[in-house]
Amino acid sequence: MAEKNITCPNCFDTKRCFEETVVVPNTNPIKKFSSYMCFNCGYMSNTLYKNDTDELERLKEISSELMTDVSMYDYDRKIHWFPSVLNMGALGIIYPDGTKDNWSWKYASVRKLSKKEQKDSAYDGHEHTLDMENAKEYGQHEFVEACKDMGIIKDI
């Protein structure tokens, strides 16, 4: 497994965009798989998101309209990049929100439910929920700030 900095094809950042490559075991000829993540703009991709692949179609099916609207094509790698949805369980979720022409990143932390809320059938007996109503908003190129607030990175 190897990780290296790359130039992001979306925001052109050179310090916060990474490619991680692994050799797929038991393949002949040897195949490699790469995943990509830019912590500056929040876009991600991998080598499976090529035109006319089942993987790309599946991703489009489960993605929001916003995510497909603002996705971009990387002509150098011949793959599609999408805004990330970063769900870190107890730490919360970072997600894109808005419309194609006016969108931002949001970070929703996890909050403890009151005893009354826990009894509500909507929460199915859970003790915590995502605090979507009080999600903090970030600009399109402030994804790394949302990650810092979530507590998953100190600085990169």
Image (cartoon, rainbow, N blue to C red):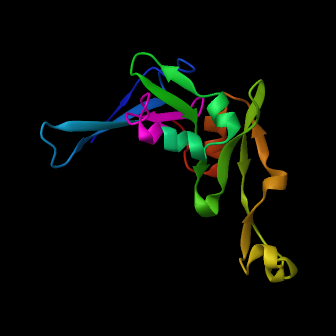
Range shown magenta: 36-56
95, above or below 44, in the image: below
127, above or below 136, in the image: below
In the displayed structure, does residue 116 sit left or right of residue 84? right
Which residue is farthest right? 116
Q: Is residue 140 visible to us here?
A: yes
1, above or below 49, in the image: below
**Residue 40 placement: quadrant:** top right
The location of residue 25, given as percent across then percent down, is: 19, 48
**Residue 21 placement: quadrant:** top left
Residue situated in front as seen by the camera: 67 or 144: 67
The location of residue 73, given as percent across then percent down, is: 51, 22
Q: Is residue 16 visible to us here?
A: no
In the displayed structure, does residue 48 sit left or right of residue 28? right
Residue situated in front as seen by the camera: 66 or 40: 66
The location of residue 153, given as percent across then percent down, is: 54, 45
